[in-house]
């Protein structure tokens, strides 16, 4: 269960990667700006070339991130639409960890197999539910 990510988790991960890459590019740009201020013509020329290359990388990275997010959103919409078309049952969920138990029920974390959304699922055995109903309504 831990390895699977919901749509929001994926978008958060993509954003985190984007932020880290942006930070790395800023550090490189700062270093290049510093080096370009040196009185060495060769170093200045190389810095201009690297700066140009970094700008191209940054634009490509932004396009790639946008494409990834768009693809994820599209896939999530398709999965959600398919899910709307059929009834949901216990077989549609992957049981993860137990949150708690009571006299008549058990509560577990369940992840939907298609949408990967997590839910708290209360499991009540049919016999116990009937006993509970009899107690509450004599």
Image: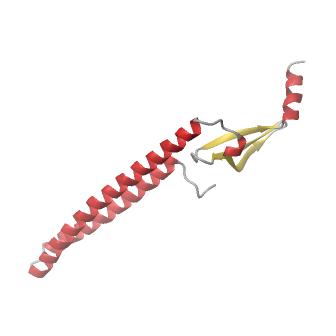
Give coordinates of residue 39: x percent, y percent.
Answer: 9, 78
> How many numbered markers are drawn?
0
Image quadrant where one finds the N terminus: bottom right
Residue 61 x %, y %:
32, 60
Say which residue appears at 84% left-offset and 31% top-offset.
129
Give the answer, above or below, for where 5 lies relative to 128: below
Quadrant showing the C terminus: top right
Residue at 50% from the left image edge and 47% from the top image edge: 7
Residue 40 at least partly seen: no
The correct choice, above or below, for 100 with respect to 16 in the image is: above
Q: Find residue 42 and report its horizontal and vertical position in percent.
A: 12, 81
- Residue 64, by quadrant, is bottom left
Q: Nearer the viewer, residue 21 or 89?
A: 89
Q: Is residue 17 visible?
A: yes
**Residue at point 31% right, 56% down?**
62
For this view, does 57 lie left or right of residue 102? Answer: left
Query: In the figure, 136 relative to 94: above or below?
Result: above
């Amino acid at each position: 269960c831990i390895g699977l990510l919901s749509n929001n988790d994926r978008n958060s991960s993509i954003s985190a990667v984007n932020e880290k890459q942006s930070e790395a590019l800023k550090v490189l740009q700062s270093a290049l700006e510093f080096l370009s201020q040196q009185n060495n013509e060769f170093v200045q020329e190389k810095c201009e070339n690297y700066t140009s290359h970094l700008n191209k990388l940054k634009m490509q990275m932004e396009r790639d991130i946008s494409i990834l997010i768009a693809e994820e959103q599209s896939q999530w919409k398709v999965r959600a639409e398919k899910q709307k078309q059929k009834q949901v049952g216990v077989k549609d969920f992957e049981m993860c960890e137990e949150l708690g138990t009571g006299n008549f029920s058990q509560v577990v974390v369940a992840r939907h197999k298609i949408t990967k959304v997590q839910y708290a699922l209360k499991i009540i055995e049919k016999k116990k539910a009937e006993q509970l109903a009899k107690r509450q309504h004599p």
